Image (spheres, coloured by chain):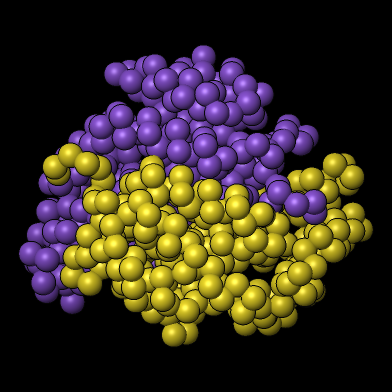
Chain colours: A yellow, B purple
Amino acid sequence: MKQIYIIGMGPGNYEQMTVEAVKKIEESDIVIGYTVYTDLIKNIWPDKNCISTPMTKEYDRCILAFEEADKGKTVALVCSGDAGVYGLAGLMLGISERFKEVKVKIVAGVTAALSGAAIIGAPLIHDFAVISLSDLLTPLEKIEKRLECAAIGDFCICLYNPGSKKRADYLEKACKILLKYKSADTPCAIAKNIGRDKEEYMLYTLNELKDIKVGMFETVFIGNSMTKVIDNKLVTPRGYKNE
Amino acid sequence: MKQIYIIGMGPGNYEQMTVEAVKKIEESDIVIGYTVYTDLIKNIWPDKNCISTPMTKEYDRCILAFEEADKGKTVALVCSGDAGVYGLAGLMLGISERFKEVKVKIVAGVTAALSGAAIIGAPLIHDFAVISLSDLLTPLEKIEKRLECAAIGDFCICLYNPGSKKRADYLEKACKILLKYKSADTPCAIAKNIGRDKEEYMLYTLNELKDIKVGMFETVFIGNSMTKVIDNKLVTPRGYKNE
């Protein structure tokens, strides 16, 4: 059978993969992914046949997956977190129209909003918005509009791709927008290296967060108006009524 | 050691639990949860010592978990999906202040937004908002405000608790708010019985969605302005620029 599994690996360690992700990787003849993730696969399954492609070549990676599957191989395309959240699941489904004989199955994984939240406490217990600060494929004005809407709606907020060398001041920009609508004391947190060596988290107020420098390995959490710090953890109540 | 694991089980089948969730349940002396989830545990581990409490007794369930752990037992408190998304992680961290000797660890799981998305395609590829339509603990005006903000921000939207007997018209109310800002043709989907027998999904336009009756086992997905139906799947592109 010509089969591709699009697999969300979770934060990167074996323990946080789903049982299904493990099984499907083990069933696959070939694993395709960005180098960082195929390296993780090699650590767990040293004999697994892996092909890695550079980070920016997502489209080529997807085509390669279909071409290999079309030869009759069972292919695992691996992504960090969940393939359906800023991942390759959508691109793959778009391409799948051209490879009608290849079956595609998406295997859900634990995205950084969830794995990061579990480290820093319970910041996303109530309604939340997930926003990427990367403007590679999205106009900055659109991102800024979403930050504004998330703040006005008093959503808990999780920011993906909060910064990079080119986007050194994007978290600051984001915080300044949020500060127009949210208290400067709003509890916030950064989770770093989730599920890897040197996993850690730091707590800030929203006002402090705006001056923090972040990179590729950070996920940022911003509380809603009810979020509190309890015993050094960020905790959002389940609602607005007394529990 | 006095230890509690707060475990997100994912949608409910063994395959979609994380390896860590499986290990921690196996390590635990006792599993505590709502009846539906302890029944799932019993299916997988027939000899496991389980205590189930009714759905509305969340606070009592949390206290029970701490009391059992305080006796020296290793306790797994299980939730569906992820314990950090409308789950008990926050309530537990609040109570943990009173049981200083009990260690608490949150084990992240695959929440319905992710497991549902994987079935219906790739609806949450880009920025998204997760909103519960349950007004048990949240004033309805707050929920309506959030729906409005999510629509104005052109977020992909995932609705939890979209309906119940008492809230039979809440999805209709929600769709009417969204229709003020979003096209009536916006592709939408409902995922039902995720990870269980009779798992299925249905596609609708936003205008059609408003007339659909939903219950406890449905999760609703609403596209952003770029979301398309491709080969009977809901697919949101990774951004607003051409790929």
B83 and B130: which is toward the camera: B130
Q: Which residue is depicted at the point 45% across and 38% down? A: B149
Find the residue positioned furthest to the bottom.
Answer: A198
**How many dots with numbers?**
0
Rendered residue at 63%/26% (across/down): B183
Q: Which residue is at the front of the view, B46 or A25?
A: A25
Instruction: State the residue at coordinates (40%, 37%).
Output: B146
Q: Image check: B188 left or right of B86?
A: right
Vertical comparison of A208 with B166: above or below: below
Picture quadrant of residue A5: bottom right
Quarter of the view holding residue A41: bottom right
Residue B17 place in picture, x, y as percent: 46, 56
Look at the image and tell me in which quarter the C terminus of chain B lies.
Answer: bottom right
Q: Which residue lies furthest to the right in this view?
A: A71
Query: Taking the image as drawn, is residue A120 in sight?
Result: no
Residue located 76% across and 46% down the image: A93
Residue B25 locus on image (x, y percent): 34, 61
Residue A35 visible in the snapshot: yes
Residue B65 horizontal/vertical position (percent): 17, 57
B156 on left or right of A99: left
Residue A179 against residue B154 in the figure, above or below = below
A15, B206: nearer the viewer: B206
Q: Quadrant of the N terminus of chain B?
A: bottom left
x, y percent for residue A224: 31, 52
